[in-house]
Image: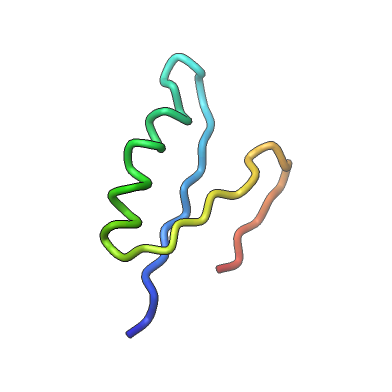
Amino acid sequence: MTQRRALVVRGGWEGHEPVRATELFIPFLEGSGYAVTRPDNSAQGAVWTG
């Protein structure tokens, strides 16, 4: 079986608390068998090729 993957990106208005919001979902994804990738969002033009 192929490993399921999830790409979690963070950004937007700080009032939406993007890091806190994504941290709520990451344990659920990992517990559901996903390999979670969290790229460095500070890199401009970052491309995920997974």
Q: Where is residue 10 in the image (x, y as percent from the top left)?
A: 51, 36
- Give the residue displayed 69% in from the left and 37% down from the top: 42
Which of the two residues, 42 or 47, is positioned nearer the viewer here? 42
Does 4 sit left or right of 9 as displayed?
left
Where 12 sits versus 15, above or below?
below
Q: Position of residue 34 (x, y in %)?
A: 36, 63
Question: Which quadrant holds the C terminus?
Answer: bottom right
Where 45 sits versus 23, above or below?
below
Looking at the image, which residue sits at the far top?
Answer: 15
Q: Where is residue 31 in the image (x, y as percent from the top left)?
A: 28, 57
Q: How is the image coloured?
A: rainbow
Where 16 sits versus 29, above or below?
above
Q: Quadrant of residue 41?
A: top right
- Give the residue displayed 40% in from the left and 37% down from the top: 23
- Give the residue displayed 37% in from the left and 46% down from the top: 26
Q: In which quarter of the image is residue 47?
A: bottom right
Numbered marks: total:
0
Where 20 sits versus 5, above or below?
above
Looking at the image, which residue sits at the far right?
Answer: 44
- Give the residue displayed 46% in from the left and 47% down from the top: 8
Question: Which quadrant holds the N terminus?
Answer: bottom left
Does 4 sit left or right of 45 as displayed?
left
Q: Where is residue 37 in the image (x, y as percent from the top left)?
A: 51, 56
